[in-house]
Image (tube, rainbow, N blue to C red):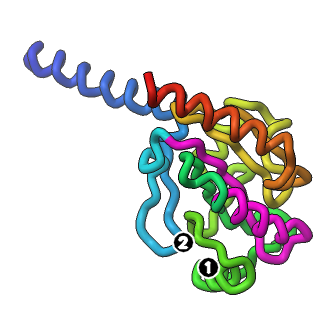
Amino acid sequence: MDIKYLKLFCLIIISIYLGTLSMVSAKSAYNFEFNSIEGGVMPLSDYQGDVILVVNTASECGFTRQYESLQSLWNEYKEDGLVVIGVPSNDFGGQEPGTNDQIKRFCAVNFNINFPMTAKTSVKGNNAHPFYKWANDELGWMASPKWNFHKYLIARDGSLQDSFSSMVSADSSNLREKIVELLAKSELLISN
């Protein structure tokens, strides 16, 4: 093999390796995408510059009423740059057994949900979506979902800022204060 081709081959292999390595050690939520509940792809980069609240949801859970406070939060702050994203998951207690169409209909009819939602997605274990594996790597196992309606808060720059357990509803002062803080920081960045 000609030395010129060997060098080119080595450069290609190194490029592929470094590209894979950079995806594994992603530093931004914008590196990830979900499948949308309507079909198609939902890249988190579509929300670049917004504060994002990612919540794994379930229709048959004791916490399902949190849909109301999530919709309220979305209504109150979406004009300020907040995006709420629901991630239906059947990982905890089999409490999201429906199809994507059934989940979407349930959310619309019972809670008038109009914030973005992903297709049903695994959020724990070996089959967890790459976003959830990254979040676990970033914040540690203690901050990973232990049940439905676990929340991750992402800053305008795509960094993972905080994690909130299922027990923390979207109308809790702790979560709201953190969102308002990140939205205010976002406004400062825009004006500078």
Would you say the residues marked 1 and 2 are in contact, meaning their CB atoms lie under 8 Å apart? yes
Q: CA distance from mark 1 to mark 2?
A: 7 Å
Q: Residue at position x 51%, y 31% from top?
A: 157
Percent x, y of residue 187: 53, 33
Tell me the element at label 2.
loop
Name the residue type under label 2: Ile
- Part of the protein shown in magenta: 50-74
Residue at image position (16%, 21%) is 8
> What residue is disc 1 on?
104
Give the mark nearest the N terminus, 1 or 2. 2
Residue 124 picture location, percent across and down = 74, 52
Report if residue 52 lies within the magenta region.
yes
Percent across and percent down for residue 174 are 85, 40
Rendered view: 35 above or below 105 = above
Residue drawn at the location 45% of the way across and 27% of the way down: 191
Occupied quadrant, residue 70: bottom right
Dot 2 crowding, Cα within 10 Å, few <14, some 14–19, many 20+: many
Q: Residues within 10 Å of mark 1 (few under 14, many from 20)?
A: many
- Kindly identify which residue carries mark 2: 37
Q: Can you see residue 52?
A: yes
